[in-house]
Image (cartoon, rainbow, N blue to C red):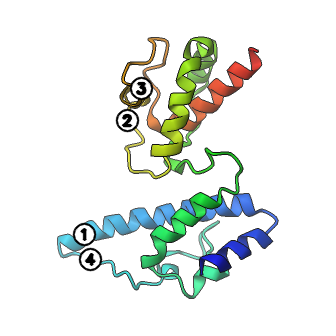
Amino acid sequence: MLEELRRELERRGDADEATLQLRALIEDVINLCLSLGSFGKAGRAAVHVETPLAELVDASAEGAKLPQALRSRAQLCHLQDLYMELVSSNHAGDSLAAVALAYQDALEPESATALAAAAAELAEWRPVLHDLLAEQLIVDRWPAGASLKEFLEFAAGEPPPDCFPESLELRHALAVYRTLAAALAGGQ
């Protein structure tokens, strides 16, 4: 099934966009299953691994159509393998294409300006942020509203400089990385 999906995505002219949309859809289904699973423990609902994936996807919703390779055979028990295949296929090009959508929110203009102004001082933190993105933020298990500064401190073992905006949250992680990269590239 995964090989068939891979071929189907490769045939499309918009494989990058299709992969990102499918990955977002699979993340939503995983989150739904986690929610239903917790209800199941309380006796209110149950999720069965044999449930067809198509039953949980509203095919009429915009952008929520399953590829043909998944419509008839994919079950909930296939979610992890499917998600990991989408992450490893990395159609979008760079190593940060696998960052979970929860950590890809845009920055407020004031935050982007503050980061760009402090880019030289924050340059040594860019690799720390890259590692956090590429290793920890590929699955949305961490709260998107958590302090990005605290996560960077934990990852590096020391706090980022005071010029790092306190208002930044994990949901901004990818935008912070890209803003720093652009500012540093522009300043060279």
Residue 111 appears in the rendering: yes
Give the distance between the C-alpha atoms of the residues marked 3 and 4, in whole angstroms. Answer: 42 Å
Q: Of the residues shown, which amino acid type is indicated by label 4?
A: Ala
Residue 104, image quadrant: top right
Q: In this image, 127 relative to 150: left or right?
A: right
- At a point 44% along the width and 51% down the height, the residue shown is 140
Residue 25 appears in the rendering: no
Q: Which residue is mark 1?
A: 39
Give the distance between the C-alpha atoms of the residues marked 1 and 3, in whole angstroms. Answer: 37 Å
Q: Of the residues shown, which amino acid type is indicated by label 3?
A: Ala
Q: Which residue is mark 3?
A: 156
User: Going from the N terminus, do you reach mark 1 or mark 3 first?
Assistant: 1
Label 2 SS? loop
Q: Of the residues shown, which amino acid type is indicated by label 1?
A: Phe
Res 146 label: 2
Check contact, mark 4 vs mark 1: CB within 8 A: yes
Indicate which label's residue lies in the foreground, 3 or 4. 3
Give the distance between the C-alpha atoms of the residues marked 4 and 1, in whole angstroms. Answer: 5 Å
Indicate which label's residue lies in the foreground, 3 or 2. 3
User: Going from the N terminus, do you reach mark 4 or mark 2 first?
Assistant: 4
User: Going from the N terminus, do you reach mark 3 or mark 4 first?
Assistant: 4
Check contact, mark 3 vs mark 2: CB within 8 A: no
Q: Which residue is mark 4?
A: 45
Indicate which label's residue lies in the foreground, 4 or 2. 2
Check contact, mark 1 vs mark 2: CB within 8 A: no
- At a point 76% along the width and 15% down the height, the residue shown is 188
